[in-house]
């Protein structure tokens, strides 16, 4: 059943906010409203669902009227266009309108007097917004619009102006104040719990993204013996290998392939027992190549880039020296990198290592040696919380398996119309690259039609071309089913 939108008005002592939530039924919406009020320690003013308005019995205070913030000339022009014929709006325009409406509902409202007329006015607007957004959601269908954890965004939006009754946004807080420190600790603890990180590992939150770690790993670990082994299975490990050569002797454990479509069996790997570490990338985002085993390195510490499949399946952390992941694919906004590092590997950085990339300096100050990207870290914490509610790491693993199977099956069922170049044994659950070989123009047509139906960013990485479906944790099963159905229809239309 498609979800519908409900508008909820909640208040604390000084402000009233309207929130929109996607609900499956009136009762689940009602429960969600209750929960929202509890989380924000607020009262529910009322909530409208598909045109109805259900008043909550705690409506007993001065009621604000509504002031919309997002009436920029662009938005106004779109509204006019929408009035004359909404069918003529492009997907992009519908999205812009959708976003503007969304902002409006969160516009802060401060009005002194409480009149029932205003109250009813707000209620009606809440209800009509709910109809409006349900209409828009209907238009978009089950597309990828809700890709980035709709509920997490909603929660973040709800707390944007006033985090947990603190009277300020997380963005405004001192990174050394008690409220932020609690968020920081909580994020690290949740990460430890989700991945069952053993006590002899530190969890660091670092700047610089995955690329920063290409250097950080080498600068922190290479010093032990001056050399390291690299398994290059795709574009990202190739970059890491290149970067490591600046800091010592980096060996390729098997020859670099021209095209990355497989992972050589471990029997073909040539490991140097003297290496300071063995490096590999668990999921090659561009090429769609994913490891389904942890290499045996005979005691040499393993360093693993999990940027694009982090927290998508259980991992035995004790088998690794370092695991790192840029947050932006699976666990949060760009700007923060999670580094899980075994304690005995900390404190051996090359002398020129900048302290911002030094594991020891970062660990010593619990990742607050300088100002951390507090807002990114806070959002990541919200994603962790969501992930824990969604069945934890096992839930994510099941989910990613189901989603990727849908797409691989659509490829398989097309009898060669779609073609995935990656070896079946190492096909990624996160990034499914495929081609349409029958006619060069078909891929372009596929992408254009998909985009018109709201399925965005399916274009393969510019270095490899083709089509790529990225199925990160936030992508729902419904989103994936829509894509698989679209693939089938497109194939049938050409046969
Ligand atoms: C597997 C992997 N490693 C490293 C990177 C580089 O990360 P960043 O852009 O954060 O430097 C990416 C980026 O997409 C990636 O997918």
Image: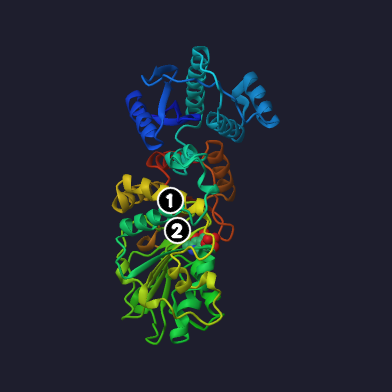
Q: Residue at x 51, y 27 (%)?
A: 136
Q: Secondary structure at mark 2?
A: loop
C-alpha span from label 2 to label 1 = 8 Å
Could you say which disc has been placed on residue 308 in the image? Answer: 2
Q: Residue at x 54, y 69 (%)?
A: 356
Residue assigned mark 1: 472
Label 2 CB less than 8 angstroms from ligand 1: yes
Residues at discs 2 and 1 in contact (Cβ within 8 Å): yes
Q: Nearer the viewer, residue 97 or 476?
A: 97
Percent across and percent down for residue 234 are 48, 67
Q: How many marks?
A: 2
Label 1 CB less than 8 angstroms from ligand 1: no
Q: Residue at x 56, y 49 (%)?
A: 439
Q: Secondary structure at mark 1?
A: loop
**Label 2 neighbour load within 10 Å: few <14, some 14-19, many 20+:** many
Name the N-terminal-most of marks 2 and 1. Answer: 2
Q: Nearer the viewer, residue 208 or 312?
A: 208
User: Residue 274's quadrant in the figure?
Assistant: bottom left
Q: Is residue 193 above or below residue 132?
A: below
Q: Nearer the viewer, residue 183 or 463?
A: 183
């Amino acid at each position: 059943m498609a979800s519908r939108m409900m508008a909820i008005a909640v208040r604390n002592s000084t402000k009233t906010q309207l929130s929109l939530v996607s609900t499956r039924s009136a009762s689940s919406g009602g429960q969600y409203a209750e929960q929202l009020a509890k989380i924000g320690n607020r009262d529910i003013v009322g909530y409208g669902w598909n045109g109805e308005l259900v008043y909550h019995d705690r409506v007993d205070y001065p009621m604000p009227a509504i002031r919309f913030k997002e009436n920029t000339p662009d938005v106004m022009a779109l509204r006019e266009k929408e009035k004359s014929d909404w069918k003529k709006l492009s997907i992009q325009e519908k999205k812009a309108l959708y976003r503007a409406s969304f902002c409006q509902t969160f516009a802060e409202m401060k009005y002194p007097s409480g009149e029932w007329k205003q109250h009813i006015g707000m209620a009606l607007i809440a209800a009509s917004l709910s109809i409006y957004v349900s209409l828009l959601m209907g238009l978009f269908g089950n597309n990828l619009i809700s890709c980035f954890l709709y509920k997490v965004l909603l929660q973040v939006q709800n707390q944007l102006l006033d985090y947990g009754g603190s009277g300020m946004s997380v963005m405004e807080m001192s990174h050394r104040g008690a409220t932020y420190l609690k968020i920081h600790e909580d994020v690290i603890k949740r990460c430890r719990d989700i991945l069952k990180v053993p006590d002899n590992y530190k969890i660091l939150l670092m700047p610089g993204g995955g690329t920063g770690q290409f250097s950080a790993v080498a600068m922190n670990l290479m010093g032990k013996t001056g050399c390291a082994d690299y398994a290059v299975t795709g574009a990202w490990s190739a970059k890491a290998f290149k970067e490591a050569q600046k800091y010592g002797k980096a060996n390729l454990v098997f020859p670099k392939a021209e095209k990355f479509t497989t992972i050589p069996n471990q029997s073909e790997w040539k490991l140097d027992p003297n290496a300071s570490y063995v490096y590999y990338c668990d999921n090659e985002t561009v090429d769609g190549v994913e490891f389904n085993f942890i290499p045996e390195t005979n005691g040499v510490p393993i360093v693993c880039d999990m940027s694009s499949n982090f927290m998508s399946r259980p991992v035995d952390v004790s088998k690794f020296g370092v695991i790192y992941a840029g947050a932006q694919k699976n666990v949060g906004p760009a700007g923060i990198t999670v580094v899980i590092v075994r304690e005995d590997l900390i404190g051996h950085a090359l002398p020129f290592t900048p302290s911002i990339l030094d594991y020891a300096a970062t660990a010593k100050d619990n990742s607050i040696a300088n100002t951390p990207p507090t807002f990114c870290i806070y959002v990541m914490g919200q994603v962790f919380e969501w992930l824990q509610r969604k069945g934890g790491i096992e839930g994510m693993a099941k989910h990613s398996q189901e989603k990727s199977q849908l797409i691989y099956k659509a490829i398989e069922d097309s009898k060669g119309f779609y073609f995935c170049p990656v070896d079946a044994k190492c096909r990624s659950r996160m990034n499914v690259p495929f081609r349409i070989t029958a006619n060069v123009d078909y891929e372009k047509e596929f992408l254009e039609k998909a985009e018109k139906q709201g399925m965005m960013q399916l274009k393969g990485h510019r270095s490899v071309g083709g089509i790529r479906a990225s199925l990160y944790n936030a992508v729902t099963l419904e989103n994936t089913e829509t894509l698989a159905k679209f693939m089938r229809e497109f194939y049938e239309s050409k046969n």
